[in-house]
Image (tube, rainbow, N blue to C red):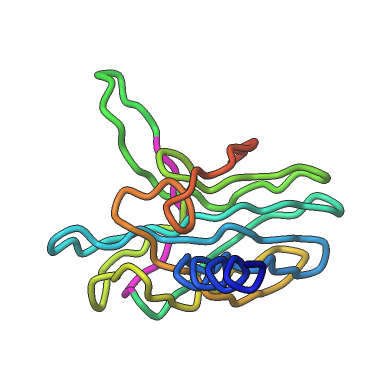
Amino acid sequence: MKRLTFALAAMILATLPAAAADIMVGEIMISEAFARASAGRARNGAAFLTIMNKGDADRLLAASAEVSARTELHTHSMDAEGVARMRPVDHIELPAGETVTLQPGGLHVMLMGLNAPLKQGDSFPLTLRFEKAGDVTFDVTVAAPGAKGPGGMQHRHGTTKTN
């Protein structure tokens, strides 16, 4: 019975999306990186992730990805009429000892002019440039359209800071 239970558990685990491993660059840990699959003929997409700064204050300065013509750091803001708008930011502050979450409806990496639709289950390399920690490249997994986290799981919420 134990063998059957173990075999069944192994089969179930094999069908689940793999959780992305934490990526370290200096004292910066990146986790939960994902993008949403493209809806219809969408020409833009976004990548989301969690950044934990275990060292001195740093800044996320830029991002790049070959899946799109342009890649920018963005945030959402509400205008006077209550309409949500996205706008680019010059950088994202990473205070010492804090976690910053790039999430739907907040800070994110904007992928503008996609070369092809983002398809659920695929992945693509994303490079982030930090002021002190330097550059790091890692794979971003494409989750379902409307996903709130990698593999469709709920995404942790943390502090968001921008300048």
Q: Nearer the viewer, residue 95 or 157?
A: 157
Residue 13 at x, y percent in the picture: 54, 67
- Image quadrant where one finds the C terminus: top right
- Residue lying farthest top? 81
- Residue lying farthest front? 1
Q: Nearer the viewer, residue 65 or 89?
A: 65
Q: Is residue 159 left or right of residue 75?
A: right
Q: Nearer the viewer, residue 155 or 11?
A: 11
Query: Which residue: 35% across, 77% down?
Result: 67
Q: Nearer the viewer, residue 58 or 125?
A: 125
27 in magenta: no
Residue 28 in which image quadrant: bottom right
- Residue lying farthest right? 55
Q: Is residue 27 left or right of residue 29?
A: right
Q: Is residue 144 left or right of residue 72?
A: left
Above or below, 130 against 73 in this view is below
Residue 1 at x, y percent in the picture: 62, 67
Residue 112 at x, y percent in the picture: 30, 64
Query: Which residue: 45% across, 70% down?
Result: 15
Span of residues in magenta:
68-76
Q: Is residue 81 left or right of residue 25?
A: left
72 in magenta: yes
Q: What is the number of callouts on the image? A: 0
Residue 21 in which image quadrant: bottom right
Which secondary structure is most common in the magenta stretch? strand
